[in-house]
Amino acid sequence: MRRADMRRINWHGIMFCVAIAAAWELLSTLQIVSPRLFPPLSLILSHLIDLTVSGTLPQVLAQTLLRMLAGLIAASVVMVPLGIWAGRSQRLWLLISPTVESLRSLPPALVILPAMLLLGIGNSMKIFAVFFAAAFPLLLNTMDGVRAIPLMFIDTARTLRTGNRTMLFEVVVPAAAPGIFSGLKSAVPIAFIVAILAEMIGGTDGIGHFLMKSQRSFDIPQMYAATFATAVGGGVLAVILNCVESACLVWYSGWKRFSGRDCPPFPATNHRNTTKDRS
């Protein structure tokens, strides 16, 4: 491994996690805390390995992720085009803004109960709950991304007599992509949480139901093992989304450097000297 790669590793964060793990193991082993409520970390890791090798944890985690992805894709298909339209049309935003502002103030978990009443406890309820949770971050961030497009882009395209279709797909959507990805990065963790909550409240499978079953049967090591697996799953989702964003927005960092957003301002002395030279 190169020295540059070694420097990029967050050694302080890794050591902090190791210190927490060692403290957990020590406190539980010495029975400073209750081993029934906080079993040794070695026992939890043993359960985590056994449940992973047997396929139990991958199966229930995959069920949750599939429901989350279904709701997230549905929200993206509906809300990203609506956000682009509302970002370019003030009339549309004035029409839908009262409804949007009223609904987005609701806690996403609150929608699970009426969804159970209307859709039952099957996949439809869970997918709808995820859809509702992810909808508003996607809508509002997409709108902000469209409204933040530099006028230079639009004016240049109009000067070249660009048609509406070309303007949308070759100017507006690429320029608003940073805002769209910002909405996705906000929506993914919320969607994951709501999918798990929906399974806890009205599910018969998935990681949320597995966690509730472990807690109710007082299988504490298994409960912690499922919790760690859920944390790993959320971390993997974040890494994947960051990689996709970096691959799709290669141009964005270069454009920011070119436009001077990442550059420090010129010193005041240089500006005065330049002014004197010109005069």
Image (spheres, rainbow, N blue to C red):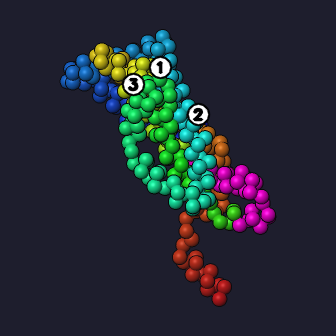
Q: Which residue is mark 1?
A: 60
Which residue is label 3 attached to?
Answer: 202
Upstream in the sequence, badge 3 or badge 1?
1
Q: Is residue 42 left or right of residue 73?
A: left
Residue span colored magenta:
155-180
Question: Marks 2 and 3, how far apart in space?
Answer: 48 Å
Query: In front: 171, or 268?
Result: 171
Query: Extreme left residue here?
Result: 32
Q: Where residue 125 appears, x then y in whole percent?
A: 46, 29
> Which dot, 1 or 2, sits closer to the camera?
1
Q: Is residue 115 left or right of residue 160?
A: left
Q: Earlier in the sequence, mark 1 or mark 2?
A: 2
Q: Amino acid at mark 2?
A: Met
What is the three-letter code of the residue carrying label 3? Gly
Residue occupying image coordinates x 51% and y 52%: 140
Does the segment drawn in magenta span residue 49? Answer: no
Quadrant of the rendering where the C terminus is positioned: bottom right
Question: In the current view of this chain or complex, which residue is farthest to the top?
Answer: 54
Q: Is residue 27 left or right of residue 204?
A: left
Query: Measured from the top left, where is residue 168 in percent x and y?
Result: 70, 54
The amino acid pointed to by label 1 is Val
Vertical relation: 224 (above or below) 115: above
Q: Is residue 2 left or right of residue 12?
A: right
Q: Quadrant of residue 87?
A: bottom right
Label 1 close to label 2 by CB (< 8 Å): no
Which circle, 3 or 1, is nearer the viewer?
Answer: 3
Disc marking residue 1: 2
